[in-house]
Image (cartoon, rainbow, N blue to C red):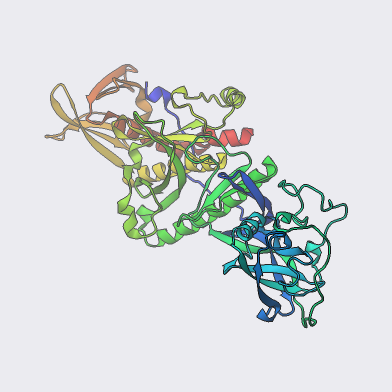
Amino acid sequence: MFLKSLLLTNHFICIFTLSLQTKMGIALLYDEGSENAFDIRLKLTKEVLTIQKQDVICVSGSNHSANHRTVTLRRQPVGGLGLSIKGGAEHKVPVVISKIFKDQAGKRTPPYKKNILHIIIVNGINVENATHEEVVHLLRNAGDEVTITVQYFREAPSFLKLPLGSPGPSSDHSSGASSPLFDSGLHLNGNSTNTAPSSPSSPIANEPKYEKRWLDTLSVPLSMARISRYKAGTDKLRSNAFEVLALDGVSTGIIQFYTSQESADWLRAVSANIGDLTLQNMKMANKCCSPCDQVVHMGWVNERPQGIDSSQPYKHKFLALKGSSFYIFSTPPVSTLDWVRAEKIYNLCEVLFKVHKLWLADDYWLQANFYLGLHQDYDLEDQRPYCFSVMVGQGKSHFFNVELGSELAVWEKSFQRAIFMEVQRTGSKTYMCSWQGEALCFTVDFALGFTCFDSKTKNVLWRFKFSQLKGSSDDGKTRVKLLFQNLDTKQIEMKELEFQDLTAILHCIHSFIAAKVASVDPVFIDSQSIARRYMYSN
């Protein structure tokens, strides 16, 4: 019984209110391949999400090449290169020569007694941004003669000074847990000794000063960007993490947060800014469109593949509600010509929007069932919350998922608004049908209700108002029975018709009745919004 299960949702007057967010905070950038993470700082503005990493920069004094010296070292049978190093990019400090061993490398290295020597180049390879292990590996395998370029400054900056309570030379430096300032590279030396190198030949004027600073490393524009909380190729949510991908494919990488609250706050903030930019893009597009072809809403979703191979992972799709049509794109339309290149285009009067999932856990589904009268569709069961479907003609449907419950509520409102506006613009729709071999026409009219007439003579066979429709049934293929109440006799009259695309007709009837009810009682329609009731109940 199609009309008995008729679900009337939102009032077509929909107002979007988004709060622009400007935020800054510490997070982690997670590498799924190596399973390592390091600190970053996020800076969110109206149009851009910027990732900052800490680096050591020269903040004052000369940074001229006069502070650079190049020397060639010869590897000795005993003692090797005769030096030890510490630091590395993974610790956000430069690699420096921490010890030079007497009688092994002292005569072959620059004679700077109390200076810190920052290794810049090894055999022509710049190692300023290299990790500790990378420099060790390079020095180990550099051959018998190693040419290095160093930058020197007299006193160690605070970030290079050993902390109190640091382990001595006998500590195990092979573990990844050691301080970046412990000597770890003694395998390059012969005999361990703390003997300092010879005195410098001359003082250095205008010595540079270095500090750690947060520097911009990546800026992701938020216009038409999308957010993903799922592990690639799976339905598994990342724990307290998400990824932001720009329109051109540039990704922030996996941004991970220390708490679920931080993750939720940042997710909402980034989503709000993306939503505001989407509204701006809609306004720009609408300036070039006629009043009857305006964009009502658009945005990214994830679509579950349908059919036999439905086990395939969700695919990213861009949906748009514009004028009389519902569009499905693989990439957002950025020009007028792009609108005709959509993967799918459906008439809005002939689609049916349905909320399927609001939450993930079973206990929340029990609450939804109790408070909202919402039942989970087990034939559509998977690991993703916030799901909806759009049923189209010929019994087909598209199944989508969004990242936030607020997005689901917006899509529910937007579909109803777009459909109601299209019904009122169109006024009526007529379909070819038949019964007992007779070619007929069936019209759904916003003002008059239902009319059936002969396709040849145009003679009206019967007409009923929307309020007279008391029920319906169909065979799921081509035939439908409509039950109307005669206003004079109060008797139920059954009208049976056959359509080539029955699903499209039933959806059209739903759209016109919902729009009619919305025009008479908008408060009732608004109260039927499943997603909105869910948001309020939480």
Quadrant occupied by the N terminus: top left
Whole-percent x and y of residue 55?
68, 63
- Image quadrant occupied by the C terminus: top right
Residue sitting at the far right: 164
Q: Residue at x 53, y 49 (%)?
A: 15
Observer-nearest of 168 and 531: 168
**281 in relation to 392, above or below:** below
Judging depth in this view, the residue of 253 and 355 nearest the camera is 253
Counting from the top left corner in percent of width and height, residue 161 is at 82, 62
- Residue 313: percent from left, percent from top: 44, 36
Place of residue 177 in the rendered image (x, y in percent of width and height, measured from the top left): 74, 47
Left or right for 224, reference 178 = left
Q: Quadrant of residue 134?
A: bottom right
Question: Is there any visible trace of residue 101 in the rendered image?
Answer: yes
Residue 92 visible in image: no
For the point 57% across and 33% down, the residue is 533
| Residue beneath the point at 47% across and 38% down | 233
Q: Is residue 332 above or below residue 159?
A: above
Looking at the image, which is closer to me, 490 or 119?
119
Q: Residue at x 84, y 56 (%)?
A: 163
Q: Quadrant of residue 373?
A: top right
* Left or right: 279 in relation to 460: right
